[in-house]
């Protein structure tokens, strides 16, 4: 679908952090392959002075989602560690807003909206449509997209800039059934 970019559009990049890369503790297959595409989106939004948000898992070392606490995930994205840093090649502009999530030990929070100021910041800035990319399609990307739908936003997944832990198809179908749209870089017009 063709998406015309204007001031009501924001880019939301989800969890492009070292621990989710193939060499990280919770690898998402080929997550590093989307970085060059993400940089194109970042450049497009930055050069049009549009809002950019980047979420990150920012967990305490005893986070409830970790196996040592009975969760399903290996330890990942512990705040202030190298694993929690954004991929080194990701060109997040200084103007972008960083959204830290999962910061409390006992709360899961895969969504960028859960326990954060993201919804408030979008509303304050008149954002009506979010374009979402990052990892993992079947976890934090999906949670963030479905929450955005709940908040009444128009939601577009940038399908050439997402990767899943498993196959993307199930997650994409589920999102589409909730009104989420799909687009790729050639369909964005500024
Ligand atoms: Zn996490």
Image: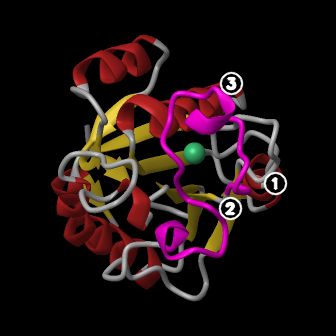
Tell whether 7 sits left or right of 101. Answer: left
How many numbered marks are there?
Answer: 3
Name above or below for residue 28 compared with residue 54.
above
Q: Secondary structure at mark 3?
A: helix
| Relative image position of residue 174 (x, y in whole percent) | 40, 14
For disc 1, the neighbor class at 10 Å (few under 14, some 14 to 19, many from 20) is few
**Mark 1 or mark 2: which comes first in sequence?**
2
Name above or below for residue 188 compared with residue 168.
below
**Mark 2 or mark 3: which comes first in sequence?**
2
Image quarter in which the N terminus is found: top left
Whether residues under marks 1 and 3 lie with C-beta atoms below 8 angstroms apart, the answer is no
For disc 2, the neighbor class at 10 Å (few under 14, some 14 to 19, many from 20) is many
At 27% across and 62% down in the image, what residue appears? 23
CA–CA distance between discs 1 and 2? Answer: 8 Å
For disc 3, the neighbor class at 10 Å (few under 14, some 14 to 19, many from 20) is few
Tell whether 180 sits left or right of 162. Answer: right
Q: Which residue is mark 3?
A: 150
**Mark 1 or mark 3: which comes first in sequence?**
1
Q: Quadrant of ligand 1?
A: top right
- Tell me the mark number nearer the camera, choosing from 2 and 3: 2
| Relative image position of residue 104 (x, y in whole percent) | 82, 48
Q: Which residue is mark 2?
A: 99
Q: Which residue is mark 1?
A: 117
């Amino acid at each position: 679908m063709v998406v015309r970019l204007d001031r009501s559009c924001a880019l939301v990049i989800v969890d492009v952090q070292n621990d989710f890369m193939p060499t990280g503790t919770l690898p998402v297959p080929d997550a590093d392959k989307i970085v060059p595409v993400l940089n194109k989106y970042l450049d497009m939004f930055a050069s049009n002075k549009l809002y950019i948000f980047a979420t990150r898992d920012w967990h305490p070392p005893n986070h409830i989602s970790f196996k040592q606490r009975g969760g399903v995930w290996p330890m990942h994205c512990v705040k202030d560690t190298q694993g929690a840093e954004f991929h080194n090649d990701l060109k997040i502009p200084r103007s972008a807003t960083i959204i830290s999530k999962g910061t409390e030990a006992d709360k899961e929070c895969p969504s960028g909206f859960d326990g954060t100021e993201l919804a408030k910041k979008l509303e304050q800035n008149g954002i009506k449509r979010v374009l979402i990319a990052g990892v993992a399609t079947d976890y934090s990307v999906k949670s963030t997209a479905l929450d955005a739908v709940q908040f009444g936003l128009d939601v577009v997944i940038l399908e050439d800039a997402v990767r899943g832990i498993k196959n993307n198809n199930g997650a994409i179908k589920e999102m589409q059934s909730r009104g989420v749209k799909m687009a790729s870089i050639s369909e964005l017009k500024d």
